Amino acid sequence: MASQSDIAEDAVLRFTGESAEEAEDFIQAVNKRAYAAGKHKDNAWIADFAYPFFSRKALRWYEDLDEAVQSDWKLLKRAILAEFIDQQPAASKVPIAAPAVVR
């Protein structure tokens, strides 16, 4: 079984919180590495593994989370999805002009 450091060195992960796509890719990459290490059911281990890869906006957000969320991957990935995917800016609400009626 691969050690946590072997898995971390396999490919450099980084999560900055800049986009929904980055959040989804980060969750998927962490899940894959946990599975490769045989730790995919160990939510505490996965949360500890993911922590060093938070940076910039995502790190500031992470540091404000409750410790219970920080230490449980199931809760942490839900929080990531809620913050960085569900909260993406909505489409423009500028009204589109109606076509002119020609008579």
Image (cartoon, rainbow, N blue to C red):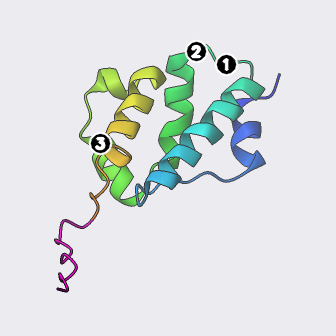
What secondary structure predominates along the stretch shown in magenta? loop
Q: Circle 1 — which element?
A: loop
- Pinpoint residue 77: horizontal percent, then vertical percent: 44, 31
Residue lying furthest top in this view? 41
Amino acid at pointer 3: Glu
Graded by Cα atoms within 10 Å as few (under 14), some (14 to 19) or many (20 or more), the crowding at tag 1 reads some
The boundaries of the magenta stretch are 92-103
User: Gap in Å between the C-alphas at discs 2 and 1?
Assistant: 5 Å
Q: Which residue is mark 3?
A: 63
Between 29 and 82, which is closer to the camera in this rendering?
A: 82
Crowding around mark 2 (Cα neighbors within 10 Å: few <14, some 14 to 19, many 20+) is some
User: Of helix, strand and loop, which one carries label 3?
Assistant: helix
Does 16 sit above or below residue 41? below
The mark that comes first in sequence, 3 or 1, is 1
Marker count (numbered): 3
Q: Position of residue 71 (x, y in %)?
A: 41, 23
The answer to whether the residues at label 2 and label 1 have Cβ atoms under 8 Å apart is: yes
Q: Report the quarter where the N terminus lies.
A: top right
* Picture quarter with the C terminus: bottom left
Q: Is residue 40 magenta?
A: no
Q: Give, as a three-letter code, the residue at label 2.
A: Asp
Q: Position of residue 83 (x, y in %)?
A: 31, 43
Instruction: Look at the image and say whether residue 101 sits in the magenta stretch.
Output: yes
Question: Would you place residue 83 above or below residue 47 in this image?
Answer: below
Q: Closer to the camera, 83 or 37?
A: 83
Q: Say which mark, if any, is on residue 39.
A: 1
| Residue 42 tag number | 2
